[in-house]
Image (tube, grey):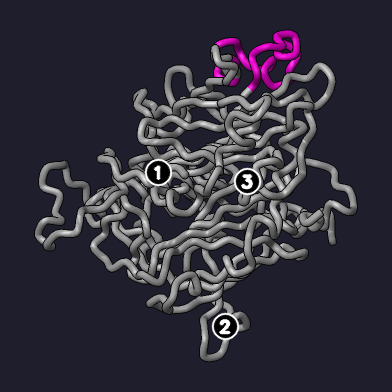
Amino acid sequence: MNNQTKLVPTPGQTVGPFYGYALPFDKDNELLAPGSPGSIRLQGTVYDGAGHTIPDAILEIWQPDAEGNVVQKTGSLVRDGYTFTGWGRGAVGNSGVFTFTTVNPGPTSPGSAPFISVAIFARGLTNRLFTRIYLPEDTEALANDPLLSSLDPERRKTLIARRDADGGLTWDVRLQGEGETVFLDFQ
Amino acid sequence: MPEETNAQLDTDESVPPAEPKAAHMPLDRAIETQADLSAEINALGEAYARALKEGSPAETQPRLDYPPYRSSILRHPTKSLHHADPETIELYSPAFGHQDVHALESDLTIQHNGEPQGERIIVAGRVLDGDGRPVAGQLVEIWQANSSGRYIHKRDQHPAPIDPNFTGIGRCITGPDGSYRFTTIKPGAYPWKNHLNAWRPAHIHFSLFGTEFTQRIITQMYFPGDQLFPLDPIYQTIVDQDARDRLVATYDHSLTEPEWALGYNWDIVLTGPKRTWTENEALGAAGDEE
């Protein structure tokens, strides 16, 4: 294979309005069983530029396990209830709220800021958006994080989840306007 | 399982309920016609052509901000995407395997007791990364309308018949050479409410994973020669003709099976990769039954 050859990527398109019978599957948003040791709820709301909640968005999360290991195990679509695969999919409900059951991701190297990688799809969104959800606790790691430290403080906040009283995480998505979430370009 | 919502939404992509034809005319809203929309689409296309001529780089992805697709107006970020170098987890992708997907899920014509209506087709191709390397052992998901342009979704109220023998969902895991193959029914065009007399060209939704999470895309595959292409604000969110063409399958007689089905070929190229590969990763999640 000629390593010089670069192919042009295929364009994305909107997920449209009718993914609801196709993409969701049983326990899609349960990276581990609710109530199991170490499990937390990750929840949030998706808003449009008018501040209205969006009832037709679907999110995917991809994260290391609690020890910071990148998991490479199959079984995300047919969950056995025991294997943590690190990936989940969750559509929002009528009120724009999504929920996942997962674990706090660990740092993938000593001192790095743990985060969850996110892909967002919605009707009206012409291509998927990527972003990150950082855990709020390790402020020193957050301050040293290469991505966060390249953002001004107002924008940086949009990538850091709030810790709920029950130990869960809340993180909202604002597609447009005031408090617009930072979305990432990896190219 | 997340609900299939049938709540009243301010959606512009649901279509009128099944009623006598006279009731289909939207009487209580400003009527934007196809001519109005085509004028907007053409103006954006001409501005892009001028920019290209003046040396702007070709655009290869859809515009997030594309006003003719009305529901994008409040749903596109207004700040430019923030460049980031992918780190750790982003340089890997979730692993899927034969535990996740049954081999029969790639045939959308055998999911019920009877044969679905419509033109049976084979859609096959390869998933490649930007270096031309096959994406092996990865998940491909598709969904589509039936032959009359109707989705099995409560919010699709298009008064075209539901086919009791066709759901329109398929999955497969790519082979070692990145290949995928589905047997299905050619979907019909369907109306939506972006503007008066708006029709989507026939398409199949494709959901794809690469070897890195940053390669994740969802897109739509179209059929060659569709007369609705210039009229469709979603297809036209990609302003570059070469880029749009990358979403159109090719009729391929070598995929056509005698007295059975017509064949279409469509290869998909993902972005990247960013990570330096080791030799055995090229095998994909082959060890999924460990």
Mark 2 vs mark 1, CA separation in Å: 38 Å
Is disc 2 surrounded by few (<14), some (14 to 19) or many (20+) residues within 10 Å? some
| Location of residue B166 with respect to B209 vertically, above or below | below
Which residues are the magenta region?
A134-159
Using the image, name the chain to which the residue with label 3 belongs. Answer: B
Residue type, label 2: Thr
Say if residue A94 shows up in the picture.
Answer: yes
The label on residue B103 is: none
Say if residue B49 shows up in the picture.
Answer: no
On the same chain: label 3 and label 1? Answer: yes
Pair 2/1: label in front = 1
Residue type, label 3: Arg
Q: Residue at 50% of width from left, 41% of height from top?
A: A121
Q: Residue at 39% of width from left, 29% of height from top?
A: A48
Labels 2 and 1 touching (C-beta < 8 A): no
Mark 2 vs mark 3, CA separation in Å: 30 Å
Q: Residue at 52% of width from left, 82% of height from top?
A: B261
* Principal secondary structure, stretch drawn in magenta: helix
Pair 3/1: label in front = 1
Is disc 1 surrounded by few (<14), some (14 to 19) or many (20+) residues within 10 Å? few
Instruction: Tell me residue A3's x, y (percent).
Output: 84, 54
Is B100 positioned to the left or the right of B117 in the image? right
Is B271 or A120 nearer to us in this picture?
A120
Residue wearing tag 3: B216
On the same chain: label 2 and label 3? Answer: yes
Q: Quadrant of the C terminus of chain B?
A: bottom right
Is B26 positioned to the left or the right of B124 in the image? left
Instruction: Tell me residue A162's x, y (percent).
Output: 56, 15
The label on residue B3 is: 1
